[in-house]
Amino acid sequence: MTNENTTPDSVSSSKPDSEIELLKSIEVSAGLVFRNGLLLITQRRAGDHLENLWEFPGGKRSAEESFEACLKRELMEELGIEVEVRDLVDDITHDYPGKRVHLKFFKCKWLRNEPQALACQNFAWVGPNQLKQYAFPAADERLLTKLFTGAELWR
Ligand SMILES: Nc1nc2c([nH]c(=O)n2[C@@H]2O[C@H](COP(=O)(O)OP(=O)(O)OP(=O)(O)O)[C@@H](O)[C@H]2O)c(=O)[nH]1
């Protein structure tokens, strides 16, 4: 995990504001998939943006697709699992060098199929204490704090 902080009001970046305004954000839907009190996380593939870091599974929304539909599709493509998409837990915009991402994180309930690493390097089901041992992208910092401090999210 990096030390970079993001809040909805302050977007961290190394670029001047004028340049950031020109960046069009990439819209991403990601899931907090719970099953029996454990959370599913995936590892990004080597060679991808933010390679080898762990993340909440999901991906880019295509035009005309809702964030919820995008998430169901991505979870099927990446892991072969079916979920029920529930509440929006966080909504974060973050600037990486040359790239602005707008992420919506939804709580999901695992419904069926054992996960398979179809489009990720690896996956793991973790509890709150294990989650601390994995390195995540800077954009996920605020959400991770919620997960570490809010036991109700895990229920
Ligand atoms: N799914 C997911 N993406 C995240 C998280 N945090 C975060 O910064 N991202 C960023 O959101 C974008 C997700 O798009 P994606 O999963 O389709 O990424 P990708 O490898 O196809 O992107 P690329 O083709 O631009 O390299 C990536 O830039 C990824 O680094 C997260 O927790 N989950």
Image (cartoon, rainbow, N blue to C red):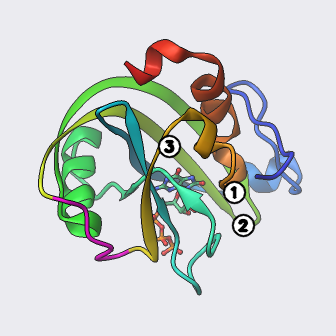
Residue labelled 3 has its Cβ within 8 Å of some atom of ligand 1: yes
For label 1, the residue is: 135
Q: Position of residue 147 (x, y in %)?
A: 57, 27
Q: Which residue is mark 2?
A: 98
- The residue range painted magenta reads 114-119
Total marks shown come to 3
Location of mark 3 (residue): 103
Identify which residue is drawn at 29% across, 67% down: 78
Query: For mark 2, does the 10 Å Cα neighbourhood hold few (<14), some (14 to 19), or many (20 or more) residues?
Result: few
Using a 10 Å C-alpha cutoff, classify the residue at mark 1 as few (fewer than 14 neighbours), some (14 to 19) or many (20 or more). Answer: some
SS category of the residue bearing label 3: strand
Instruction: Say if 151 sits above or below 82 in the image.
Output: above
Q: Percent from the top left, x then y, of residue 121?
A: 46, 77
Which residue shows up at 79% across the image and 56% down it? 19
Residue drawn at 18 percent across, 45 percent down:
69
Q: Is residue 80 above or below residue 142?
A: below
**Residue nearest the viewer, comparing 54 with 61:** 54
Q: Secondary structure at mark 1?
A: loop
Q: Is mark 2 within 8 Å of ligand 1?
A: no
